[in-house]
């Protein structure tokens, strides 16, 4: 179905599936980098710091690749849903699914957010421009939207998601998170707010509204069959030629580096380094064997001397 933000009869879903599925080249490249670090140091281990980084890269690459492939073939929940009953928000940092009825929204605005991103390697100000916000009362926020767990809220909850403004709370809907233009998302929100709850003097369409602080289930979804539209980030697009190149090249690198680590093939430098390592190991083993034999021989000589001294100077009474 064609997406029309002004058609308030459509339930719009904004997803991240397409964005997450596009992470596959990143995951494969990260995995290749981890394997490459080990391959360059063969037959020895890298330095401790490099070893830790290589293991971290391998684990992160595998995790990202599996996650991206899973999102390509299996959809997750939408981040935002604009339905006749209100705005549904699914936060990835928690299991709570927030719900804001249209009648609880007092106004709609656009703001710029600047956050000091201190979790990055190089802390810096991170701007979010043209963010659509819906304003609700603090009473409604504390009763319906607030999450008690600091861990589930995350470090930027009150800076990027729910920003206080006097006696109101600005609930942010980030268009860039779901890959849509800010003007398009704001127009869709404003059209439904005016139709279903924001301005009571306007004529409203005869669409049943149910205010329930929960996510619509499958039965409710079937009730509006044919009118639910994925507005952004739905099914991942087919691989383009450039996408194929970005995937195939890391895969080739993974196969080459992995087969090298498995000993299927080796470079001349690795063969020489392996020969020197084996030579050193043989010398080290021979040294320890000869040292052990020498110590045993010396110990035996000492015991013989001690026994001879006892016999020469100690006489029985």
Image (cartoon, rainbow, N blue to C red):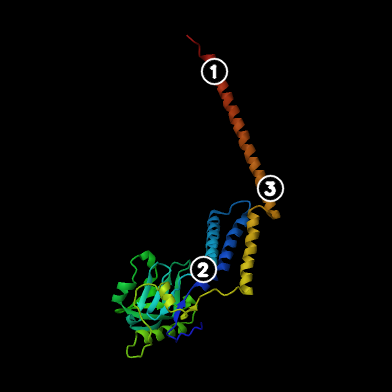
Determine whether label 1 and label 2 are within 8 Å by CB. no
Q: Residue 282 carries which label?
A: none
Can residue 102 be seen here? The reply is yes
Determine whether label 1 and label 3 are within 8 Å by CB. no
Q: Which residue is drawn at 37% across and 79% down?
A: 86
Q: Position of residue 189 (x, y in %)?
A: 41, 83
Q: Residue 275 carries which label?
A: 3
Task: Please tell me which of labels 1 and 3 falls first in the chain.
Answer: 3
Query: According to the image, label 1 marks what residue?
Result: 309
Mark closer to the observer (3, 2): 2
Task: Please tell me which of labels 3 and 2 falls first in the chain.
Answer: 2
Q: Which mark is residue 74?
A: 2
Q: Residue at x 42, y 78 (%)?
A: 223
**Left/right of residue 70 with respect to residue 7 in the rendered view:** right
Task: Please tell me which of labels 1 and 2 falls first in the chain.
Answer: 2
Using the rendered view, name the quadrant where residue 51 is placed: bottom right
């Amino acid at each position: 179905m064609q997406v029309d933000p002004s058609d308030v009869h459509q339930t719009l879903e904004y997803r991240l599936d397409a964005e997450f599925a596009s992470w596959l080249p990143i995951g494969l490249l990260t995995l290749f980098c981890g394997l490459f670090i080990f391959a360059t140091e063969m037959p020895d281990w890298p330095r401790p710091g490099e070893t830790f980084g290589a293991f971290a890269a391998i684990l992160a690459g595998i995790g990202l690749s599996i996650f991206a492939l899973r999102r390509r073939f299996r959809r997750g929940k939408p981040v935002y849903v604009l339905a006749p009953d209100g705005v549904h928000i699914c936060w990835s940092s928690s299991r709570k699914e927030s719900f804001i009825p249209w009648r609880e929204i007092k106004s709609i605005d656009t703001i710029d957010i600047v956050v000091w991103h201190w979790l990055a390697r190089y802390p810096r100000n991170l701007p979010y421009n043209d963010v659509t916000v819906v304003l609700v009362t603090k009473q409604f926020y504390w009763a319906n939207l607030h999450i008690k767990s600091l861990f589930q809220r995350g470090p930027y909850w009150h800076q990027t998601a729910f920003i206080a403004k006097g006696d109101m709370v600005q609930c942010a809907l980030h268009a860039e998170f779901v890959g849509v233009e800010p003007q398009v998302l704001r127009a869709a929100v404003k059209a439904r707010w005016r139709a279903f709850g924001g301005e009571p003097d306007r004529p409203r369409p005869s669409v049943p509204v149910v205010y329930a602080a929960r996510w619509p289930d499958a039965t409710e979804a079937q009730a509006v069959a044919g009118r639910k539209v994925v507005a952004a980030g739905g099914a991942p697009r087919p691989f383009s030629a450039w996408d194929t190149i970005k995937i195939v090249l890391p895969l080739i690198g993974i196969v080459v580096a992995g087969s090298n680590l498995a000993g299927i093939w080796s470079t001349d430098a690795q063969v020489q380094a392996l020969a020197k390592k084996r030579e050193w190991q043989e010398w080290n083993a021979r040294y320890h064997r000869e040292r052990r034999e020498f110590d045993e021989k010396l110990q035996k000589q000492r015991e013989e001397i001690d026994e001879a001294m006892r016999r020469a100077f100690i006489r029985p009474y």
